[in-house]
């Protein structure tokens, strides 16, 4: 089974800071990786798919990169509305879809 | 804009079968892939299985022996059945639509989620 690890598990940053979250896959998954944002009490929202493609309507301060086993989600300038837990998700072999444990982002 | 809404009992007894329905509006269920995903504080997000509009299914191997997902095109719904439930199946259950084209492997639209508690 594929495993996804995320680091850090949580972070606290100031408004305007550049924030980077990493997702590492236990085996190569090409570019079959997505990032989701879940704000407190809300449902997950697709931000980026295919490792680097921004979902329609998502602010351009969000970006994704990587392929194979190492991926990154970057928020170029953290905003108060970005307080959330961020999850990566992969598509691979059984199970077909796996989620990372999440990274909680707070405002300092 | 497609919308999804889960419905079903919020409380299920241990050893019984959990049954949920997802009603799709604003789009036809006769296209695309449709999944069930659950979320718990302890295990996070877990994919349960999907159904394609053709009726093809695939399930998470850890749940495969207990899961059935089916389609009701006449009512624009799809359903989840999870048998022999235990407290470990207590979770928020989401019905989800996959994206299309290059985003088909990802989850584009989510229902609001429904909490199902397994308890006697």
Image (cartoon, grey):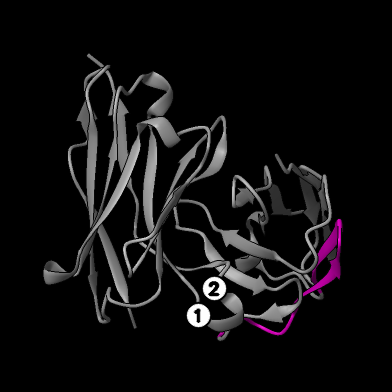
- Label pair 2/1, CB-CB below 8 angstroms: yes
Highlighted magenta segment, given as a residue range: A57-75
Determine the secondary structure under disc 1: loop
Chain name for mark 1:
B
Q: Does residue A85 sit above or below B75 in this rendering?
A: above
What secondary structure is the stretch in magenta mostly built from? strand
Residue A51 picture quarter: bottom right
Q: How many marks?
A: 2
Is residue A18 visible in the rendered image? The answer is: no
Q: Residue at x 25, y 61 (%)?
A: B5
Q: CA distance from mark 2 to mark 1?
A: 4 Å
Query: Which residue is identified by label 2?
Result: B104
Label 2: how many residues lie within 10 Å, few (<14), some (14-19) or many (20+)?
Answer: some
In this view, the residue in front, B41 or B72, is B72
In this view, the residue in front, B61 or B75, is B61
Residue B75: where, in percent of width, then height? 12, 68
Question: Can you tell which mark lies on residue B100?
Answer: 1
């Amino acid at each position: 089974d594929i495993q996804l690890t995320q680091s850090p598990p949580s972070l606290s940053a100031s408004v305007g800071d550049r924030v980077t979250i990493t997702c590492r896959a236990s085996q190569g998954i090409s570019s079959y990786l997505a990032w989701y944002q879940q704000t407190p009490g809300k449902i997950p929202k697709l931000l980026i798919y295919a490792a680097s493609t921004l979902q329609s309507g998502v602010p351009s301060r969000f970006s994704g990169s990587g392929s194979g086993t190492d991926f990154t989600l970057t928020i170029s300038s953290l905003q108060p509305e970005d307080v959330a837990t961020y999850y990566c998700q992969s598509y691979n072999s059984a199970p077909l879809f796996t989620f990372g444990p999440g990274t909680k982002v707070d405002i300092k | 804009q497609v919308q999804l809404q889960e419905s079903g009992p919020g409380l299920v007894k241990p050893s019984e079968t959990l049954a949920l329905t997802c009603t799709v509006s604003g789009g036809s269920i006769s296209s695309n892939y449709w999944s069930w995903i659950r979320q718990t504080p302890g295990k996070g997000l877990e994919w349960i299985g999907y159904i394609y509009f053709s009726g093809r299914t695939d399930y998470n191997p850890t749940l495969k022996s207990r899961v059935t997902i089916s389609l009701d095109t006449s009512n624009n719904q799809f359903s989840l059945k999870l048998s022999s439930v235990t407290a470990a199946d207590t979770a928020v259950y989401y019905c989800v639509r996959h994206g299309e084209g290059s985003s088909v492997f990802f989850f584009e639209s989510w229902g609001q989620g429904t909490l199902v508690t397994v308890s006697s």
